[in-house]
Image: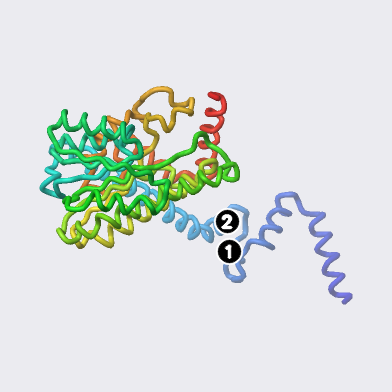
């Protein structure tokens, strides 16, 4: 015990008598040197000490450099892959020209939610390819007007089915009866309901929640269930389910809507893998904002632009991706938005929705 105190006293006197440089050197030796006595003997100056520490850290630096190189390589591969997809899906098909949809899929196409917006524009594109169109919506007068316009413009056959999908399962027997005997080659599930304005989930009425379920989810399921057996029997057909870019992240203030579109996206992708071996092409279409009545309440979008196209421009490009991409925005500027949006942290996505919500409030 006396020896220990004596040693500590000597150490204290030594530290007091040393210069500041020697104190730093002594402390570094005490806490940083390896336990190997040969290495300790080799360190007789501060520069040598730093060199020894650097040598011991070099393996960590090399590891970090390797991780950084791997990350850069991965990012470059992702960018190249996305660029290739952009060109393959959106530009090459347009250079090749319109596909013969009748030969590929069949004589008749069904488009739901087709009296305005994307549905009407997509029906027009199908008609321009020589495909006969069955129009399904809830307003008879508007259906008849669109059917007449398509028949006169493109010299095709049209048929209409009045059905209000928000009514639930009771509408489908009459729809099935109207479709009987027709060779349905293409089904476009476009019918959907949105919000009158962005709002919290508890502020939705019970009826609105059921409308979101019956129209955005159940209608697509039931329409696929009606036409898919015939496609499988003929070993050809195409199904297009119109989802939304809101499906890539949870979207507050439109919670139930974005969840319904996420369901539709997953439903489409699973259906593709299930029925592609049987000759059926299933596409999940996930557009961004399109200048239609659905976004009329958002003051940020007061006119058409490159990233907010008209329904006609969108449909003109989207139809060229049919048979090419199982999951696509359908419109190349939206694909660029999706590339960035996919990697956004959720908090930044939420912040963007908050800006849209504030813009909507200003308009009201």
Examine the image and state in which quarter residue 127 appears: top left
* Front one among 171 and 331: 171
Q: Quadrant of the N terminus?
A: bottom right
Q: Is residue 235 above or below residue 101?
A: below
Q: Which residue lies at the image location 58% right of the left edge and 64% below the top edge?
A: 42
Examine the image and state in which quarter residue 232 appears: bottom left
Q: Which residue lies at the image location 83% right of the left edge and 66% below the top edge?
A: 8
Left of 3 or right of it: where is 111? left
Left of 268 or right of it: where is 362? right
Q: Is residue 113 above or below residue 213?
A: above
Counting other residues with Cα less than 10 Å from the Cα at mark 2, is it few (<14), some (14-19), or many (20 or more)? few
Q: Secondary structure at mark 1?
A: helix
Position in image of residue 84 (x %, y %)? 25, 44
Q: Secondary structure at mark 2?
A: helix
CA distance for labels 2 and 1? 8 Å
Q: Which residue lies at the image location 33% right of the left edge and 52% below the top edge?
A: 172
Q: Quadrant of the C terminus?
A: top right
Residue at the extreme bottom: 1
Left of 23 or right of it: where is 212? left
Counting other residues with Cα less than 10 Å from the Cα at mark 1, is it few (<14), some (14-19), or many (20 or more)? few
Observer able to see residue 178: yes
Question: Sequence order check: which comes first, mark 2 or mark 1?
Answer: 1
* Front one among 120 and 238: 120
Position in image of residue 201 (x %, y %)? 57, 45
- Pointer 1 residue: 42
- Coloring applied to the structure: rainbow
Question: Do the numbered discs 2 and 1 sit on residues whose CB atoms are within 8 Å?
Answer: yes
Position in image of residue 113 (x %, y %)? 33, 40
Position in image of residue 333 (x %, y %)? 33, 34
- Pointer 2 residue: 48
């Amino acid at each position: 015990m006396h020896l220990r105190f004596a040693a500590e006293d000597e150490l204290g006197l030594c530290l007091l008598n040393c210069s500041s440089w020697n104190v730093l050197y002594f402390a570094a030796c005490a806490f940083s040197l390896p336990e190997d006595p040969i290495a300790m003997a080799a360190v007789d100056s501060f520069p040598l000490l730093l060199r020894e520490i650097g040598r011991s850290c070099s393996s960590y630096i090399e590891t970090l450099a390797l991780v950084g190189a791997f990350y850069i390589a991965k990012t470059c591969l992702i960018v190249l892959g996305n660029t290739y997809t952009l060109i393959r899906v959106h530009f090459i098909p347009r250079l090749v020209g319109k596909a013969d949809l009748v030969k590929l899929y069949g004589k008749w196409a069904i488009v739901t939610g087709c009296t305005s917006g994307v549905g009407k524009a997509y029906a027009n594109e199908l008609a321009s390819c020589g495909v006969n169109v069955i129009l399904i919506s809830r307003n008879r007068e508007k259906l008849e007007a669109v059917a007449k316009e398509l028949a006169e413009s493109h010299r095709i056959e049209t048929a209409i089915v009045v059905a209000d999908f928000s009514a639930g399962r009771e509408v489908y027997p009459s729809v099935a009866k109207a479709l009987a005997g027709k060779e349905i080659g293409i089904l476009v599930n476009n019918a959907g309901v949105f919000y009158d304005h962005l709002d919290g989930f508890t502020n939705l009425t019970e009826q609105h929640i059921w409308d979101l379920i019956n129209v955005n989810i159940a209608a697509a399921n039931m329409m696929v269930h009606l036409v898919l057996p015939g496609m499988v029997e003929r070993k050809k057909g195409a199904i297009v389910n119109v989802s939304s870019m809101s499906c890539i992240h949870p979207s507050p203030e439109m919670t139930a809507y974005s969840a319904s579109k996420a369901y539709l996206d997953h439903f489409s992708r699973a259906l593709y893998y299930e029925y592609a071996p049987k000759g059926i092409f299933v596409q999940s279409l996930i557009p961004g904002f399109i200048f239609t009545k659905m976004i009329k309440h958002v003051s940020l979008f007061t006119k058409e632009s490159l990233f907010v196209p008209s329904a006609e421009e969108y449909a003109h490009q989207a139809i060229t991706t049919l048979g090419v991409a199982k999951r696509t925005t359908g419109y190349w500027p939206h694909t660029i938005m999706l590339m960035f949006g996919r990697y956004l942290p959720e908090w930044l996505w939420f912040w963007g929705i908050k800006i849209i919500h504030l813009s909507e409030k200003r308009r009201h």
